[in-house]
Image (spheres, rainbow, N blue to C red):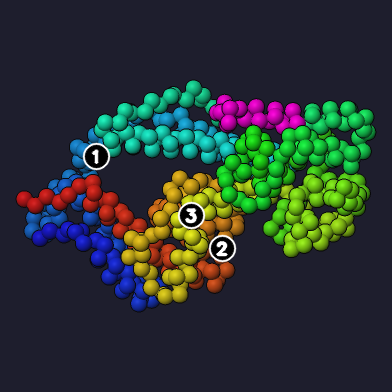
Amino acid sequence: MICCPSSSSALLLSLSLSLSRLIPCVRFAVIFWLFSMSTLMSSTVAGGSLLRYDGGKKAWRARAQRWSRPTSRAAHTLCSLATVPKDPKLEIQKAARQRFVREISFKSKDKDVSLAKALLYVAAEDEAFISYSRDMDAHAFAREREDAPIPFKAQLEVDSVEEFPLAGKTIAGWLDELDMIAKEVQAELVSRDIGCHLVEVLKAVNVVLFESRDFKRFHALTEPKFCYLHTALNSGCGSAILLSIIYIEICQRLGITIVGSCVGEDFLIWPDSGNLEELFKVSSGHSLFAIINGKCVENPRSKASDLDGRSLLQLDIATNRDIIGVALANLIRLHWKRASRSTHGLMLTSPLRSIHGSGKPNTAESSMAPLLRPRDLRLAIMASERLLILQPHNWSLRRDLGMLLYYSKRYGEAVQELSICMAFAPVEEAEVLEPFVEKLHLLRFEQSWNSQEQTGSLMVP
């Protein structure tokens, strides 16, 4: 008698519908049994052996030994992977993440966290991933078309993230660019024979940024080039949070402390000294506060339009880590929007509500998953991972990361993140997550089963 997983999808569909009718403790027991069977079946398929019931204990022991040995194909694959050198861009990604974690480490004081360095490490990791992904796409295209020449892959001649080029400059080069802008502000003050009064210095910063260099602020997140620090410095166009970060970095080099706070959907900045009422005096049609923060201050529909010098003092001041978190949240929204462009209106939590409303986990739904861009989805996951490092106890961020992993079909990792999320989430949110996590267990089981079906086939003597 042979046990063969030839109709795994249909079997799992019927199992999932049956599980929905069981009490929770029984459901988890059945799922545990399914995983046990999955391990047994995987061993059978990988070893090319039969699962027989007529051979006695010696036959079972002999077959178990065969299951523990990899097939010649698997052994050859492992040997090949061991001899293939790692791509330098993968090492750059790893090093950039490590540098980012070190920069925002909670062991250091918040004032010692560099906004510019942290965001340049973010850019380096993402740029290295994009470059590596493009190389893989080019090679895959060449393999699919036998007549197409294999593209030449130039070896990356850098072995550290500090030397990795970002739009033609290293991380140190972009930090020097910020230094250069600060020196231009100093030259502007000297040329006008202006003293070091706070308001006059801020006006000089505005002249250099928004007139001489013609920086433009974009509130809508549409292009990646607006959401990375090096591309914003290179093109003069950036998101509102990035322009605020550039402003903070320049003023810091001039000895002026700039603070900020989230007000509604906007992030606003102002100097941490002086008479704040002076910022709201209108000159040439605009206040200094409006020039620093953009049009949102003058938009009557924005909460920022109701602020004055006194109300600024009542706002919660954001830490440097909070500001980095705002920039990362923008990256998550941008890349998710681009990843789900072909599925208009798709939300991260859409699958949660549909399952919780019906009460039935549907494994057939996995075959009708929305079409997403894998590269942008991966970038959204990377930004979410970094944000979770900053806010490890934020259950909603962990839920969002779990959902991104689900859309990426990384079901095992999604189960882990969502299970942790259930421990910290409010009771009503945990109740929504529970049936979805059960579905993920089944999807993970099906995924492992199907992958083993593709690596080997059962042989009947």
Residue 304 x/y as whole percent: 77, 58
Q: Is residue 326 above or below residue 169?
A: below
Q: Is residue 321 above or below residue 176?
A: below
Q: CA distance from mark 3 to mark 2?
A: 32 Å
Residue 169 is inside the magenta segment? yes
The dot on residue 74 is: 1
**Which residue is label 2 attached to?**
424
Q: Nearer the viewer, residue 115 or 297?
A: 297
**Residue at the top extreme of this rendering:** 157
Residue 132 x/y as whole percent: 44, 35
- The magenta region covers 163-181
Mark 1 or mark 2, which is nearer the start of the sequence?
1
Q: Secondary structure at mark 2?
A: helix
Q: Quadrant of residue 406?
A: bottom left
Residues marked 1 and 3 touching at CB (< 8 Å): no
Q: Nearer the viewer, residue 417 or 262?
A: 262
Q: Quadrant of residue 178?
A: top right
Query: Which amino acid, mark 2?
Result: Phe
Residue 371 is inside the magenta segment? no
**Which residue is label 3 attached to?**
341
